[in-house]
Image (spheres, grey):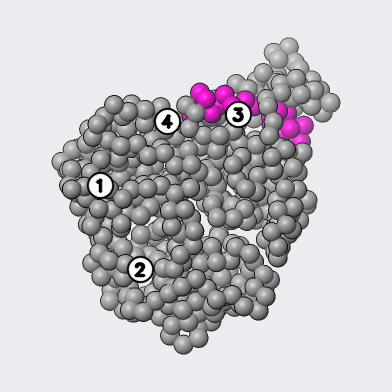
C-alpha cells in the first residue's frame, strides 16, 4: 500500500475538487478512433507530478523512469540502469551503472548526480514526501563517476531493489527550485516515453510521445487522461465514443460485454476495500466493537453481490492468494460470535436493537468518497451487517476535501494495496510511528506487537524470519483489528479494440496512468 493509500485511481492520487468536465464526442478531448491517440477515463488526478513528492514512486509513471522497472510478471528489469544492481557487503551496498546515452526530454544528459539528487532530496526531512519511510534503509547514496551510483544501507533490506523503480528527476531543473512549491510539480521534465503537454486541473492531463525516448519512440503519440470521478458518467462517455478506455466497476463493465468494438481486461490486484476504525473514536476505539464488526461482516456476499465475483474476501491486508498470506486466518461470517463479543464487552441491546455501554450508543459515521459506486455499495453492505449485530453505522458520502480533516476521528471506507513485498504496503498502513502522517496509518492504529512484526519484517535478513513476522502480524490483526478488511477487488477495464500488445500486471491499489492495460502504453502497436 502506498502512502496515499486511501485515495482512488491514480499514482499518488487525490480526487479532483470539482466535477470533471465532460467533452462532447469529436471535441479536443474526445476519442476519435485514431490508432495514434487514446483518451482514457480515470476517477482521479495526481496532487503533483513530481517524484520528489511521491509521484510515480512505484513505477510506470510514463514521464519518468527509475533505475529499474517491472515487466508484465512484476519481475525487476533494468531501465535507466544497464543491469540489475551489484549487491555487496552482505547486502549493505547496491551499485547501479547507468545506461549510456539517456537524455531528459529537454536534451540534457542523465548522470549519476541526478540519481543522487533525487534520493537525497526525498530523504531530506524538509521535503514534504510522506513516502520517505519507504526509503528508511538508506544510509547514504553517492555518485561514483558520472555513470555509477552506490547506495549504502543501514541494515540489509531484502526488497531494496524494488524501491529503485522510483523515478529520477533532473538536478539542473529541480535542483534550482523548492521541491515543495516549485514549478516542477506541475511542469515536470523526465526521461520517460511521454512528456506533459497540458494539465487542466479537475479535467484532464494530456501527454505527447517523447520522440527521443531511449526505449524507442512510442507508436501512440497522444494520451489524454480524462478525470471523470463518477463511475456512471465514465461508462456513458465510453459508450458515446468520448473515451477510448476506462476503468469501470464490474456491473458497468458488464454492459459492454456484447460490444464487438470494445475489449474487456481484468487484472488481479492487491487493491483492498477496508473500513478504518479510528482509535480516537468512543465507539470505533473499543476493541469489542472492532472484533464484533470483523465477525459480523459478510465478505463473501460482498464479493458475489457488489463485485459480481470479480474479487476475493479480505481477511487482512494481504490477498488470500499472496504467498505471504496466513492461511489460518480465513474466517466465515459469524453473527452469533459478534453478539457474544459485544455482550462480553458490556455493549447491551436497547429497545431499538442498537447496543449501548455506559450511556454511549454503539453508533458511528462511515464516510465514503462521492461518486465511487463500489465504495458506496461496500459501505451500505457493511452498515447492514453491523446493524444485525446491534451497531448503528451511519453512511455518508463526501468529497476528499471534507473527508481529510475528519479521518482521525471518523471511519472511512478506504482503499489501498501495494505489490512487490509486504513491507511496501503494510508498514505505512499500520506502524504507529506513522499515525497521522499524511494518509499513513490514518486510523492511528497502535499495537506494539504489530510494530515489532513490521520492524522485523523490514529488517529481517532471511525469508523465514520475515515470513514469521508477517504471519504474526496477520494473526494479531484478527485479535486486535484496527480496520475491518472487506474485499480485494479485481480491476476491470474496457477499451476500444484498436491496438495490440495490451496486457495487465498484478496491480496495486493505484490504477490510473500507472496500471491498467496502458501500463506499457509505449509498447502498444496499432492493429493492422
Q: Name the residue under label 1.
A: 499
Instruction: State which region is magenta.
Output: 287-307
Looking at marks 4 and 2 on the same chain, the residue that comes earlier in the sequence is marked by 2
Does residue 131 appear to the left or right of 347 in the view shown?
A: left
Tell me the crowding category of disc 4: few under 14, some 14 to 19, or many 20 or more residues within 10 angstroms, Cα based.
many
Instruction: Answer whether labels 1 and 4 touch (C-beta < 8 Å).
Output: no
In this view, 175 is above or below 333: below
Distance between the Cα atoms at labels 3 and 1?
A: 37 Å
In magenta segment, residue 306 = yes
How much space separates mark 2 and mark 3, taking CA atoms? 43 Å
Q: What residue sits right under mark 4 in the picture?
A: 250
Distance of label 4 from label 2 (alpha carbons): 35 Å
Question: Secondary structure under badge 1?
Answer: strand
Q: Which of pointers 2 and 1 lies earlier in the amino acid sequence?
A: 2
Q: Which residue lies furthest to the top in this view?
A: 351
Mark 2 or 3, nearer chain start:
2
Amino acid at each position: 500500500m502506498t502512502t496515499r493509500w486511501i485515495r482512488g485511481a491514480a499514482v499518488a492520487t487525490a480526487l479532483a475538487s470539482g466535477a470533471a468536465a465532460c467533452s462532447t464526442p469529436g471535441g479536443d478531448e474526445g476519442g476519435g478512433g485514431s490508432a495514434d491517440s487514446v483518451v482514457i477515463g480515470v476517477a482521479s488526478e495526481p496532487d503533483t507530478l513530481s517524484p520528489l513528492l511521491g509521484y510515480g514512486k512505484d513505477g510506470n509513471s510514463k514521464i519518468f523512469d527509475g533505475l529499474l522497472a517491472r515487466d508484465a510478471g512484476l519481475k525487476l528489469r533494468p531501465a535507466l540502469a544497464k543491469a540489475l544492481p551489484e549487491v555487496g557487503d552482505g547486502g549493505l551496498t547496491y551499485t547501479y551503472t547507468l545506461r549510456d546515452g539517456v537524455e531528459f526530454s529537454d536534451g540534457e544528459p542523465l548522470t549519476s548526480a541526478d540519481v543522487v539528487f533525487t534520493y537525497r532530496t526525498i530523504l531530506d526531512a524538509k521535503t514534504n514526501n510522506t513516502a520517505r519511510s519507504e526509503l528508511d534503509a538508506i544510509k547514504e547514496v553517492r555518485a561514483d563517476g558520472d555513470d555509477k551510483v552506490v547506495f549504502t544501507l543501514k541494515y540489509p533490506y531484502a526488497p531494496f531493489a524494488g524501491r529503485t523503480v522510483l523515478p529520477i528527476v533532473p538536478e539542473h531543473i529541480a535542483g534550482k527550485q523548492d521541491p515543495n512549491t516549485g514549478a516542477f510539480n506541475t511542469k515536470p521534465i523526465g526521461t520517460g516515453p511521454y512528456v506533459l503537454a497540458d494539465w487542466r486541473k479537475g479535467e484532464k492531463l494530456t501527454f505527447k510521445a517523447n520522440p527521443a525516448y531511449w526505449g524507442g519512440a512510442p507508436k501512440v503519440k497522444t494520451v489524454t487522461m480524462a478525470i471523470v470521478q463518477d463511475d456512471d458518467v465514465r461508462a456513458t462517455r465510453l459508450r458515446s465514443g468520448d473515451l477510448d478506455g476506462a476503468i469501470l466497476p464490474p456491473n458497468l463493465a458488464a454492459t459492454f460485454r456484447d460490444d464487438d468494438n470494445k475489449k474487456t481486461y481484468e487484472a488481479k490486484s492487491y487493491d483492498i476495500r477496508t473500513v478504518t476504525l479510528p482509535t480516537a473514536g468512543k465507539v470505533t476505539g473499543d476493541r469489542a466493537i472492532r472484533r464484533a464488526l470483523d465477525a459480523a461482516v459478510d465478505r463473501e456476499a460482498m464479493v458475489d453481490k457488489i463485485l459480481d465475483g470479480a474479487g476475493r474476501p479480505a481477511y487482512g491486508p494481504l490477498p488470500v492468494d499472496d504467498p505471504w498470506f496466513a492461511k489460518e486466518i480465513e474466517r466465515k461470517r459469524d453473527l452469533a460470535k459478534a453478539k457474544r463479543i459485544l455482550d462480553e464487552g458490556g455493549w447491551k441491546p436497547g429497545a431499538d436493537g442498537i447496543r449501548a455501554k455506559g450511556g454511549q450508543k454503539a453508533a458511528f459515521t462511515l464516510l465514503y468518497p462521492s461518486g465511487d459506486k463500489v465504495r458506496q455499495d461496500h459501505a451500505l453492505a457493511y452498515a447492514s451487517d453491523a446493524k444485525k449485530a446491534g451497531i448503528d453505522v451511519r453512511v455518508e458520502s463526501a468529497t476528499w476535501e471534507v473527508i481529510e480533516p475528519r479521518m482521525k476521528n471518523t471511519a472511512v471506507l478506504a482503499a489501498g494495496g501495494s505489490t512487490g513485498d509486504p513491507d511496501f504496503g503494510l508498514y505505512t498502513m499500520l506502524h504507529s510511528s506513522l499515525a497521522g502522517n499524511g494518509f499513513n496509518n490514518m486510523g492511528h492504529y497502535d499495537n506494539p506487537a504489530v510494530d515489532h512484526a513490521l520492524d522485523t519484517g523490514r529488517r529481517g535478513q532471511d525469508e523465514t524470519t520475515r515470513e514469521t513476522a508477517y504471519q504474526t502480524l496477520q494473526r494479531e490483526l484478527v485479535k486486535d483489528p484496527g480496520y475491518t478488511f472487506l474485499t480485494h477487488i479485481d480491476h476491470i477495464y474496457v477499451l476500444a479494440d484498436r491496438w495490440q500488445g495490451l496486457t495487465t500486471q498484478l496491480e496495486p491499489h493505484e490504477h490510473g496512468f500507472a496500471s491498467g492495460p496502458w501500463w506499457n502504453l509505449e509498447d502498444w502497436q496499432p492493429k493492422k
